Amino acid sequence: MPKRKAETVASSFVSPYQQTLEELRRASADGDERLDAALGVVLRALRAERGALFVRDDDGVLALRASRALPPAAPSKLDGAAPRDDVMTLGPGDEAHDRHGLVLLVRIDQQDRLLAVLGLGPREGRLTYGTQEHAFLRSVAAGAAAPIESSQLRAELRRVRQKLSVKVFELRNLFDIGRDLSGSSVEEAIQNLVITTVMGHFVVSRCGLYLLGPRGLFLSHERGLRRDGERAPIPPDEAREGLAGFNRPTTVGELPQGPLRRRLERDRLVLAVPVSTGERVDGILAIGERASGTAFSAEDGELAEALARQAATALENVRLQRIRDEKQRQDRELQIAREIQRSLLPPEPPQIAGIDVAGESRPCYEVGGDSYDWIPLGGERLALVVADVSGKGTPASLLMASVHAFVHALAGTAAPAQLIERLNRFLFARTQASRFVTLFYGELDAAEHRLVYVNAGHVPPIRVARDGTVSRLSQGGGPALGLLPDEAYQVGEVALGSGDVVAMVTDGVTEAMSPDEREFGDARVSDVLRRLSGEDSSSILSGLVAAVHDWADAPSFSDDLTALVLKAR
């Protein structure tokens, strides 16, 4: 055949495919939007009965992206291994042949990386795929690689933009909700806002917030749960067992078998989210199925966890604020109690010739159970009282106020022993069995320098005579007040010489402990009184308190400290 005629015949085969390649470049310029159109161009050029384009997704699966005339039951992905050759002929037994009706597979690679596979069915009129068609398909594969990759990149960019838009929307929501939560001081409002937000965002019809309390895990707030369901708290031990290792959003079915999981499953809740502000889990935010039936994604779990964390923080802030408010209220009440207790102490020493008196009381807490008093009885007579209520703090101070009022009301109206017996019966009838009062009550006749006293279980006062002799006022007396209902008390009496010093103290003085746990003791009280006996009562009292403070070597006392010093001039 002449050369020119041969070239004409050859061009008659190449020219239609060459034109098709030009058409393909135009059809595939827009990438993903024209894949189906490009597939149609190839099928028409080859007169193929059917065709399919499988594109590799992020998981490495060859997923069907464009198709023509595939069997109705053809799957949406290309199972089995990808073709090894550029163009691979299929026959019975090959998965793509049997399930998709394809007879030819063409690899579409980009830099030795598989991007897609073009599958073709039989040609019309029993035509076969020859060398020229294989060459054409290789050209198609080479030209399609760049548009497909570009399409994948654009699709990925769209997905990233979509995810970014969703994240921005979620962050805005979280910011708005966080602002609303931080501005609320009502637990009910906080819980309602979180539940409403979860149900609206995830489009669910039921949701529950379970919180840990003293009685266990209880349903604190819910929406859409069955009213006839079990609502008793899950006991603490069982709740802790159910929450063991629960530190991330998980499906309810992944929780340990137990009461918690059964409770959530019965209420048809499918997603469990920890409510915590740190390592400690304070509860569960449980969410029901979506109305669409779609499963919750990892991103959904992250958003729900962020909401639960915000709720936990807001609830913790409310709890701490409630504690602060309660502490401030208690501080105000203690301040009032302290002022009242201080007002019960005598304002200034009595002005009685020949008698010098000073007293001081220091509670170890804001208020205490110690007290001292001097009560003018008319003329040159004076009642002296030092008392110590068992216990410390506010309960002891309230009982001491009752004792103070009783003694003030009855001092001088009856003999000392009768007064103390009446006080004992009063306290026995109106106080708890564990409460009692030790009390020293004396009536001083300044004109005669005679002190008549009753000691009800109290530390016996120490007397230091002018010559330095030490003795204890330990005559008569009886047990502490409030323990026995009908106890009789005996009276003691002592004559005071000029310069005598009597110290009436509570056990906060004698039992004050040093850092090495040694008591201050009666002997040291006596030594201080002897050393300072030449001073007035105020100086003696200050020296005694300072000595106890130095002995304890602490900024505050471990027990209430009270002392009343009497000096006969």
Image (tube, rainbow, N blue to C red):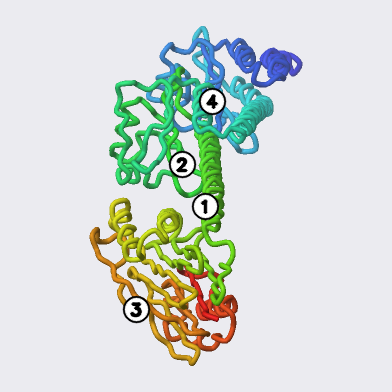
- Which quadrant holds the N terminus? top right
According to the picture, the residue beneath numbered tag 2 turns out to be 248
According to the picture, the residue beneath numbered tag 4 turns out to be 197
What whole-number distance in Å separates the C-alpha atoms at marks 4 and 2? Answer: 20 Å
According to the picture, the residue beneath numbered tag 3 turns out to be 474
Marked residue nearer the N-terminal end (1 or 4): 4
Give left or right: position of 355 versus 140. left
Q: Secondary structure at mark 3?
A: loop
Image location of residue 395, percent across then percent down: 41, 54
Residues at marks 3 and 1 touching, judged by CB atoms closer than 8 Å? no
Residue at the image position 64 percent from the left and 30 percent from the top: 176
Marked residue nearer the N-terminal end (2 or 1): 2
Disc 4: CA contacts within 10 A as few (<14), some (14-19) or many (>=20): some
Marked residue nearer the N-terminal end (3 or 1): 1
Instruction: Tell me: residue 30, above or below residue 182.
Output: above
The numbered mark at residue 337 is: 1
Camera-nearest residue between 194 and 451: 451
Give the number of the mark in front: 2 or 1: 1
Image location of residue 549, percent across then percent down: 54, 76
* Amino acid type, residue under disc 3 in the picture: Ser
What whole-number distance in Å separates the C-alpha atoms at marks 1 and 4? Answer: 47 Å
Give left or right: position of 97 versus 237. right
Residue at the image position 39 percent from the left and 58 percent from the top: 413
Residues at marks 1 and 4 touching, judged by CB atoms closer than 8 Å? no
* Amino acid type, residue under disc 1 in the picture: Ala
